Image (cartoon, coloured by chain):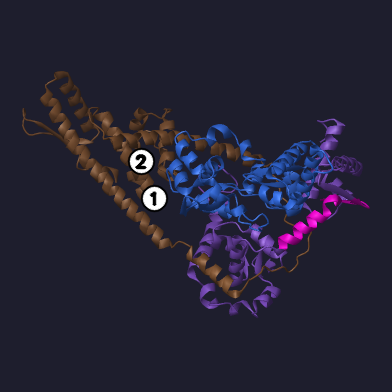
Chain colours: A brown, B blue, C purple
Amino acid sequence: MPCHIRITLFEGPLELLLALIEDRKLDVTRVSLAEVADQYLAFLSAERDRIDLANLASFLVIASRLILIKSKMLLPVLEFTDEEEEAIEDLEIRLAEYRKFREASLGLARLFERGSRSFPREKFLGAPETFSPPKGLTVDVLARQFENLLGAIPSKERIIEETIEEVMSLEERIATLQDSLRVRAQMTFRELAAAGNRMEVIVSFLAVLELVKQRFVVADQGDAFGDIRISVAERESAVFF
Amino acid sequence: MSETGSTSTDAAMIASRIESILFTNGEPITRKRLAAVLDVSEDSVREAAGILRHRHEDDSSGLILIELDDAMELSTAPKNASLVESFVAKDREEGLGKATLEVLSVIAYRAPVTRSEIDAIRGVNSSFALRNLLLRGLIERETNPLDTREYRYSPSFRMLELLGIGSVSELPDHASLSSDERAAGLVSASEEVKPDDSESGSDPLSADDDR
Amino acid sequence: MSETGSTSTDAAMIASRIESILFTNGEPITRKRLAAVLDVSEDSVREAAGILRHRHEDDSSGLILIELDDAMELSTAPKNASLVESFVAKDREEGLGKATLEVLSVIAYRAPVTRSEIDAIRGVNSSFALRNLLLRGLIERETNPLDTREYRYSPSFRMLELLGIGSVSELPDHASLSSDERAAGLVSASEEVKPDDSESGSDPLSADDDR
């Protein structure tokens, strides 16, 4: 476990995710995303309070996508909605895109570091300052201009309020997602068992064991030969956040 | 300007006049305004700019022509940076942080670009970095003609000056990074709107200095 | 600078450097000073000047090297004198651009105010607008007694006269507008940021960003 990575060093989720993947020398694929998902979520839950409020929402969005990818890895028969599939594809594309610009920013840094910059010439250098006022300049024009400028300054309180709202709605969405996964996981296992294909049942059973091991779901067998009930761990949200 | 000289003489004369104006004005000036001041076509200005650019490639030239969008300025040759720096006794520019450099690179390669587009690429809120870049004059903003509640950000002449390049096409990997396959559809759609965008240039002599 | 190139390359390089220095300076510079700055002989400076003079004889050049006694200066070509003159005159008759007017209003209501304060309130760099306002005599600057590297800007006496007021306090709603907390908040916020900002300055790749 490369525990030297600290979330506070990362401004954004893509940066963190890319660092986690590159730390394991992996390419950006769904498999590698699933592999680092736990770490990402662990970082997020451990350092949540240290994340800039303005960026918390972005971290949460990516978290919800990683939860999807991870659950699909653990339970391959789990069906994604089109929307979920799109969200995951979008994450892969964006990571690749972000990586390009991170490289590009290093290129710009190298240009800056060369120190070979150009200096412009000052306007009308050497020309005398002559009083040449524009037409129609009055105190009222200046007053209106300054008032407009003040009016365009966004209030800090409003920005913070909006961000908090966004974060709250995201946390709700993640909770909904977890609920939905729980239902779908239960359904899937029951259907599989009912289908009677022995091999599939075994595979699914192994998947369940893996899920249990990851503390992602809890398996619950009422009595020795009774139905196995599985559900996404109730404590899940506590683990993440 | 037609009666006397040949075309090449005309072009040289226009180049000479443009160089005089650029030298005097110091600040960037649009092709449109130059065309109006000299009473020639914008194509003539473009041709003359080519002559100037070529002439300043000479080893003995201490100047370069920087061109950005539809404007240009004359500036010192980057190779002489340290000397000029010591002479003008200006403070060295402070370096940029990692996040600010990322935002700058998105703007450099994808301009004009909105904050939400930058945020989407970086996966994070970029307003601090944007403000920092605006205050340092490394980028410029204009109201998005497609959505007046939003700004669009572009590189400034100052950014090219500090990077020591004559145009954004000299940025590393410019060709590959400036095109976004995914957004190709969106970009071409917004390009159609561009003509409306020329509002700043409507008055060729306008002293508008929003850049 | 002797070990590498041939004499002609050296001469071209010196010419290039001299041109860069002259470009950024509005006043004549002595051969002696140039020789000292470039760490070459005065003869080398003379030779380089010859190269520049020759290059500026080209029809497409808009600049000329003026040599007077033992000093030299870069200037616009005499053939373009009337064009440049009318360009400068017209520029001064222009209306103020939106940005310039905005800066003027900030200076009027918050005088004496530093450039970084103006920038913080506007959220963008104001150097072009300030230069323009100074050239037109609408504002004045004085060294900031608190920080000698910075200027403080105020409306010029003649501008107050033009506005028909004796002091900025006679501006409409001066008391409330000048102390408006929205602007004050931005100014103080930008000051708080400063120390953190410089710490990341030395290394442009430093992880913490300059917010």
**Which secondary structure, mark 1?**
helix
Give the spatial CA distance, label 1 vs label 2: 17 Å
Tell whether position C72 is magenta: yes
Q: Earlier in the sequence, mark 1 or mark 2?
A: 1
Residue at 77% x, 43% y: name it: B15
Nearest the viewer among A201 and B196 is: B196
Which residue is situated farthest in the front direction here? B3
- A56 left or right of C112? left
In the picture of the structure, the residue carrying the numbered disc 1 is A50
The residue range painted magenta reads C67-92
Tell whether position C11 is magenta: no
> What amino acid is labelled 1 in the image?
Arg
Check the image and report above or below for A141 versus B68.
Answer: below
Residue at 30% x, 37% y: name it: A83
Q: Is residue B38 visible?
A: yes
**Which secondary structure, mark 2?**
helix
Nearest the viewer among B4 and C97 is: B4
Residue C43: x percent and y percent? Answer: 92, 42
Disc number placed over residue A62 in the picture, else none? 2
